[in-house]
């Protein structure tokens, strides 16, 4: 297991690299290059400068997240050829700088969704929160406006204004695209990029739908074990693997997270994991929690044990934390609660190692 921490880049993250370096057992980041729209090439010199900068702070960059996929690829439009060529260039540029895993998602339009980015909870901290009943009372445009307004001035990956400016138009196109059509377009994309990944030693890691159910009538195809059985079979290669996000999949209590980890871990199809806890509050209603098992609804010991037994070499990072100790940061991505999360996950891991 390699413990890492998500970092948004210099000037774009409230947490400096030197703080991350001081978290016990944290050896690297899961990074991203900010400022490139979905479909743009991440240039080699920019990737090189980024990796050198992080390495200079004593941290590795073997996982890169948020290499977003242009909607033309998901929709299967003729424009996809150009964007797939660009994506391949980005894969090669990342691989040339030592990146081993690329995290992405194939969710139409929306990356992740919450109805409140700062829900105050019993201990006085605040957390990300989702209530499907509230979502159904909102239009997609209203949700985008609210999310942007509540981001405390930080950019939110997946919510880039340029991706969302043509929202109504894009939603209209998706009305004619069902889950099977989306899978067909997905298979086409994987068929083009996976051979490149195999050649340059990179693994693609698809992130689950968050939350783990359809929203706004859009096709969503990545939120159950069965969904991922299909995805991993679209192109059967270790380069077509999963980013196992316990909190995204775990938003649906029907998903047995330790069992899903074992299922794909045994097949060697988990490239990295986001490990966090959520608390169920009712039907399609949850809030996020500290990483401690007792604070949420997921059994974090069982999760770490499943990783330890079936995919012990994966990259791991804590995920969304509470906003505690009056920290001002991007919602879900403060230093304090995620650092506590790492300490806790490392403690579970040491106990598993020594048992
Ligand atoms: Mn995640």
Image (cartoon, helix red, strand yellow):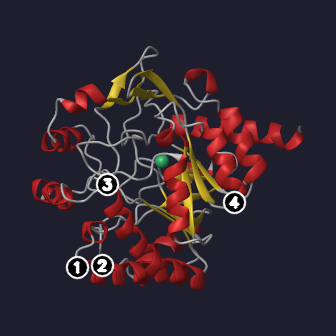
Front-lying residue, 292 or 240: 240
Nearer to us of marks 2 and 3 is 2
Above or below, 180 relative to 276: below
Q: Quadrant of the C terminus?
A: top right
In the image, the residue with mark 3 has its CB under 8 Å from the nearest atom of ligand 1 = no
Mark 3 vs mark 1: which is more N-terminal?
1
Which of the two marks, 3 or 4, is nearer to us in this view?
Answer: 4
112, 65: nearer the viewer: 112
The residue tagged 3 is 158
Label 3 crowd (10 A; few <14 / some 14-19 / many >=20)? many
Q: Which residue is drawn at 46% across and 61% down?
A: 65
Residue 246 pos. (x, y %): 55, 42
Task: Give the number of the disc on residue 267.
Answer: 4
Q: Earlier in the sequence, mark 3 or mark 4?
A: 3
The Cα–Cα distance between marks 3 and 1, rounded to whole angstroms, is 20 Å
Note whether residue 234 is visible: yes
Residue shown at the point (47%, 24%) measured from the top left: 280
Label 1 to label 4: alpha-carbon separation: 35 Å
CB-based contact (under 8 Å), mark 2 and mark 4: no
Q: Which of marks 2 and 4 is in front?
A: 4
Give residue 221's position: percent from left, percent from top: 40, 53
**For residue 144, side relative to residue 131 (left or right):** left
Q: Quadrant of the N terminus?
A: bottom right
Residue furthest right in the image = 355
In which quarter of the view is residue 229 placed?
Answer: bottom right
Q: Nearer the viewer, mark 3 or mark 1?
A: 1
Q: Mark 2 points at which residue?
A: 83
Q: Nearer the viewer, residue 187 or 91?
A: 187
Q: How far apart are marks 2 and 3 (CA)?
A: 17 Å
Residue corresponding to mark 1: 79
SS label for mark 1: loop
């Amino acid at each position: 297991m390699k413990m890492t921490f998500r970092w948004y880049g210099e000037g774009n993250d409230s947490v400096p690299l030197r703080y991350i370096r001081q978290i016990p057992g944290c050896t690297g980041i899961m990074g991203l290059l900010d400022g490139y729209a979905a479909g743009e090439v991440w240039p080699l010199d920019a990737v090189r400068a980024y990796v050198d900068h992080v390495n200079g702070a004593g941290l590795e960059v073997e996982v890169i997240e948020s290499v977003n996929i242009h909607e033309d690829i998901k929709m299967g439009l003729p424009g996809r050829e150009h964007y797939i060529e660009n994506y391949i260039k980005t894969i090669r540029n990342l691989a040339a700088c030592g990146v081993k895993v690329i995290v992405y998602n194939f969710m139409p339009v929306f990356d992740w969704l919450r109805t409140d980015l700062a829900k105050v909870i019993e201990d006085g901290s605040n957390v990300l929160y989702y209530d499907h009943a509230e979502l159904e009372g909102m239009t997609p445009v209203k949700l985008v406006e609210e999310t942007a307004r509540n981001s405390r001035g930080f950019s939110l990956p997946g919510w880039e204004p340029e991706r969302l400016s043509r929202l109504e138009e894009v939603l209209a196109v998706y009305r004619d695209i069902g889950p099977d059509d989306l899978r067909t377009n997905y298979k086409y994309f994987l068929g083009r990029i996976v051979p490149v990944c195999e050649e340059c030693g990179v693994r693609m890691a698809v992130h689950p739908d968050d939350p783990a159910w359809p929203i706004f009538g859009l096709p969503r195809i990545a939120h159950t074990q069965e969904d991922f059985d299909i995805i991993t079979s679209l192109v059967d290669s270790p380069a077509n693997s999963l980013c196992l996000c316990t909190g995204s999949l775990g938003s649906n209590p029907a998903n047995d997270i330790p069992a899903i980890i074992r299922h794909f871990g045994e097949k060697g199809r988990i490239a990295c994991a986001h490990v966090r806890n959520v608390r169920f509050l009712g039907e399609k209603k949850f809030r996020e929690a500290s990483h401690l098992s007792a604070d949420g609804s997921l059994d974090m010991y069982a999760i770490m044990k499943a990783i330890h037994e079936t995919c012990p070499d994966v990259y791991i990072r804590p995920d969304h934390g509470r906003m505690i100790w009056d920290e001002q940061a991007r919602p879900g991505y403060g230093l304090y609660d995620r650092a506590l999360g790492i300490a806790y996950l490392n403690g579970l891991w040491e106990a598993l190692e020594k048992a």
